Image (cartoon, rainbow, N blue to C red):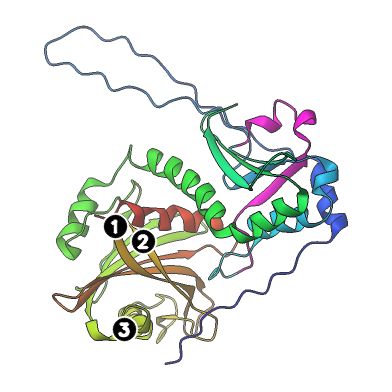
């Protein structure tokens, strides 16, 4: 089997399109009203604190860029768009890491603008010796990340953004991840988590509303969160691997192992169908660090043979050289009518609770 490593070709939006970003996009603002409960003082009574009220505007993975118009013209706009709008590898349709909700000078930002969950500030200060970035939390709203890039010239700011795009992007993604997990951890599926630990030897958060499926292969653990028009899947299994091959060269073996497990799953409506990794499309391979462990990450698409089903998947392999085994966790999504970015993040974020 041939493993294709993805190559991203970035097409920058036109200058005119970027200028249009100055016009705000109206969004629904969610506010959680907290109720304060009065309890009688009884022996052994414990009151759990309510979650902090959310006051941010906009949706997840939206960014307001606070940048003067004369700075925005030119390379800074290119660098910011490359940073935020680069396509996420492995999704069935092109989707950027973030959406730019609006670009506006900080002096002209409205109170609503300032309440977005992520603010990217581009500050040009001629006396700046070397470009830097800093992070502040909950400046104008909760939860909120305010990331400020400081440079002496627009050209220097652009070069800094390009050179540090991966790091800056991860800071913003980690902020979104932490907020999602904070909410998911309040309602865990405890029985499924115990089942996952028994099957894999690892503990991982599994949110409520997932249910356990019963695959034909009893060595495959499978959980489903089913909606009317979409579904999220979690698969887990153990497999053998060659420790001498190295993590990266093990990619083909892991894909083969995933396909072997997927082949036991078929569409109930189509005889002879089976689930499989789509190897005709790029599979992006990377090494990521999670809680001190180096994991192989694979991103790509899955499909059902002889049927019109398919979607995005992200797989993680945790290697144990002592036993020559790997624990593989696969997150997959079927959502033909929806954006995959947020729904896949909901799944992928769970791997960061693995221990």
| Residue 298 horizontal/vertical position (percent) | 43, 73
Within 10 Å of disc 1 (Cα), the crowding (few <14, some 14-19, many 20+) is few
Q: What secondary structure is marked by label 2?
A: strand
Of 194 and 102, nearer the camera is 102
Q: Residues within 10 Å of mark 2 (few under 14, many from 20)?
A: few
Q: Which mark is residue 260?
A: 3
Residue at image location 38% in from the left, 69% down from the top: 315
Question: Does residue 273 appear to the left or right of 127 in the view shown?
Answer: left
What is the number of callouts on the image?
A: 3
- Image quarter in which the C terminus is found: bottom left
Is residue 339 at least partly visible in the picture? no
Secondary structure category for the residue under label 1:
loop
Look at mark 2 in the image and give the residue it sits on: 289
Q: Give, as a single range, the part of the protein colored magenta.
A: 93-116
Q: CA distance from mark 3 to mark 1?
A: 29 Å
Closer to the chain start, of discs 2 and 3, is 3
The label number, if any, that marks residue 292 in the structure image: 1
Q: Nearer the viewer, residue 339 or 264?
A: 339
**Camera-side mark, 3 or 1:** 1
Residue 272 in sight here: yes
Q: Position of residue 13 (x, y in %)?
A: 79, 62
- Along the line of sight, the residue nearer the viewer: 344 or 71: 71
Q: Are marks 2 and 1 in contact (CB under 8 Å)?
A: yes
Residue 188: image location, x then y, percent: 29, 44
Where, by quadrant of the figure, is residue 266 drawn? bottom left
The mark that comes first in sequence, 3 or 1, is 3
């Amino acid at each position: 089997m041939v493993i294709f490593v993805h190559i991203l070709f970035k097409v920058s939006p036109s200058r005119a399109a970027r200028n249009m970003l100055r016009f705000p996009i109206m969004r629904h603002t969610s506010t959680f009203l907290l109720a304060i409960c009065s309890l009688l003082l009884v022996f052994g009574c414990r009151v759990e604190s309510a979650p902090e009220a959310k006051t941010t505007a906009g949706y997840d993975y939206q960014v307001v860029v606070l940048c003067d118009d004369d700075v925005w013209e030119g390379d800074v706009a290119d660098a910011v768009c490359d940073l935020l709008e680069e396509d996420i590898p492995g999704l069935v349709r092109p989707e950027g890491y973030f959406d730019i909700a609006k670009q506006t000078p900080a002096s002209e930002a409205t109170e609503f603008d300032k309440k977005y969950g992520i603010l990217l500030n581009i500050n040009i200060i001629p006396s700046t010796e070397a470009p830097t970035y800093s992070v502040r939390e909950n400046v104008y709203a909760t939860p909120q990340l305010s990331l400020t890039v400081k440079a002496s010239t627009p050209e220097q700011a652009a070069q800094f953004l390009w050179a540090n795009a991966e790091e800056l992007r991860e800071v913003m993604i980690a902020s979104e991840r932490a907020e999602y997990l904070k909410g998911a951890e309040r309602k865990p599926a405890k029985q499924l988590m115990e089942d996952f630990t028994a099957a894999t030897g690892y503990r991982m958060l599994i949110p409520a509303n997932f249910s356990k499926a019963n695959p034909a292969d009893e060595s495959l653990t499978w959980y489903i969160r089913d909606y009317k028009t979409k579904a999220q899947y979690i698969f887990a299994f153990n497999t053998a691997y060659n420790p001498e091959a190295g993590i990266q060269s093990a990619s083909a073996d892991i894909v083969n192992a995933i396909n072997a497990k997927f082949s036991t799953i078929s569409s109930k409506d189509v005889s002879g169908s089976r689930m499989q990794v789509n190897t005709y499309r790029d599979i992006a391979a990377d090494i990521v660090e999670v809680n001190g462990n180096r994991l192989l990450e694979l991103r790509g698409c899955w499909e059902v043979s002889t049927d019109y089903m398919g979607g995005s998947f992200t797989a993680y392999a945790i290697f144990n050289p002592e036993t020559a085994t790997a624990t593989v966790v696969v997150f997959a999504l079927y959502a033909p009518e929806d954006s995959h970015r947020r729904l896949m993040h909901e799944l992928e974020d769970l791997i960061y609770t693995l221990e």
